[in-house]
Amino acid sequence: MYSESSEQVVQLLLDHGYNADPDAVKYLSNLDNPQAATHEIIQSVPDDTLILTSNIVKQALDGIPENQTSSPQSFNTDPSVSSADQHLDNSKNLSGQSKESPDEMEGVNSSAGSSSRNSGRSLERQTVDICGDVTGESIGTGEYDDFVKLFRDRYEKLSNQLRSRVNHRPTDSVEKMSGGSDAALIGMVNDVRSTSNGHWLIELEDPHGTFPCLIMKDRDIAEVVDELLLDEVIAVEGTLSDDSGILFADSVRFPDIPRTYTPSTADRHVQAALISDVHVGSVDFVEDAWHQFTSWLHKPEAESIEYLLIAGDMVEGVGVYPGQDEELEIVDIYEQYEQFSEYLKEVPDDIEIIMIPGNHDAVRLAEPQPGFDQELRDIMAVHDARISGNPSTVTIEGVSVLMYHGVSLDELIAELPDDKATYDDPHLPMHQLLKKRHLAPQYGGHMRLAPEPEDYLVIDEIPDIFHTGHVHKRGFGKYHGVLAINSGCWQSQTEFQKSVDLVPDVAGVPVVDLDTLNVTVHTF
């Protein structure tokens, strides 16, 4: 009877149209990394091969270059979802170890981003457009009026997304309606509490006042209460009580992404690599894996990658948490960015780089975060990298990518039930943010939010791709047509992560085909 690894080999071969005799399957399944070896076999055997024998397998393996370090797994993410534990093959080469020679690595490092190894990249690149960037626009001072303007702007933007779906009336008008009438409210969640009978009382607030809505515990919609967060905007439809003092809820609606949404795609085959949480300066930064990644970018198989999107935490930072100095390889913040810039030089110079800051970077902690100041921009001037604020929407090849570092994911994972948000499946809380159409629905808590006159964290325009980091876990999946990707990290397990039993997903790069929105993950 086949072992689990044998069954994986057989299924992988069948998926690519190959059969194999038992000896070939046994040989592959006994290798250190059967899936990686099978991937390489599929790429190297002649096209007219239908049945793989053990001799064909051995000959093919003998012909694989020693510097083949990454083994891709490609998944069509529509409509399924993916997480690192489910799908990622933590492979570098057939033995699980890097075989890049020191001479080869020295050659990559000294090339300083030379594009000579990727001459196949297209010269027909479209102009990159960036919007939603708070850099240079921040005028909030923390006065009372700033908070009023912020919440009014949030309410107006999100209520506009709901008004076409419900026959909405303001709270003061609903108060004057006859008892027993059908009514609908759009409001910000001001309070959620249970009654003595186990029902749920939701208090909604709009610019005209507040109004209570009752969700009966025996109704199907009662389960939606677990998803509600204070300060998010929802619509409630139902029937007024006899005295018109309470709205008995029949349905609850979120701003949400319409199920009919169709994402835009590129009109040519072009790819974008998505990474985050590099954490240069940390003793746990995986330098060897980074060199393997940048070396691979110079290879022909990566020539379709024309964009590198970095979603924050370029460096480890200084003074981010107590005792951090004991975990620093580089203790000066500017030297951290200088070293990060050196690592960027290894990226081919015909790859366009776009990056936003994160909570470890040297910008204000309160979101929305402006992009780096001029001194840091000058340090990171490699490739003329585009630097924007957190969040920002970047449009490449006609595909809009909402880039957000992702600090609010911690809040959602803490507040929502496990089937809605976990660290192991970071795309699930991302789906919740898309559903609520806001990057930080709950104001306060551990989140630091700046009271700007405009709420930059509202997801006003629907993105085609939603890219985050922060939680050091990798996962991706489509939600109503939007591809949500959390790209993992480049930092091995820290002492804090050990204390909370969080195992990071390290040195894996999701690569998106912008013409199909399919995702391939390469591990290094």
Image: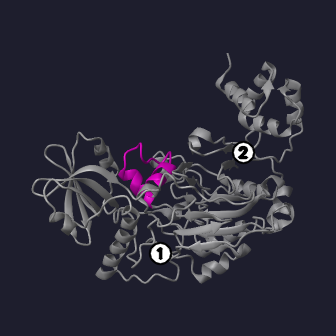
Amino acid type of the residue tagged 2 in the rendering: Pro
| Mark seen at residue 72 | 2
Q: Is residue 52 left or right of residue 333?
A: right
- Residue at (68, 73) in percent of width and height: 385
Query: Could you classify mark 2 by the number of other residues whose Cα lies within 10 Å: few (under 14), some (14-19), or many (20 or more)?
Result: many
Q: Nearer the N terminus, badge 2 or badge 1?
A: 2
Q: Tell me if I can see residue 329 in this picture.
A: no
Queried whether the magenta region covers residue 177, the answer comes back as no
Location of residue 258 with respect to 454 vertically, above or below: above
Q: Which quadrant is home to the N terminus?
A: top right
Residue depth check, mark 2 versus mark 1: number of the one nearer the observer: 2
Display colour scheme: one colour
- x and y percentages locating residue 163 in the rendered image: 36, 63
The spot of residue 497 in percent (x, y) is 49, 50
Q: Is residue 43 above or below residue 458?
A: above
Provide residue 467's location: percent of width, then percent of height.
Answer: 56, 59
Q: Which residues are magenta?
A: 408-433
Magenta stretch encompasses residue 409: yes
| Of residues 385 and 16, the one drawn nearer to the viewer in this rendering | 16
Q: In the figure, residue 487 lies in which quadrant?
A: bottom right
Which mark is drawn over residue 323? none
Residue named by callout 1 = 364
Give the left or right position of residue 429, taking residue 120 as reference: left
* Amino acid type at image mark 1: Arg
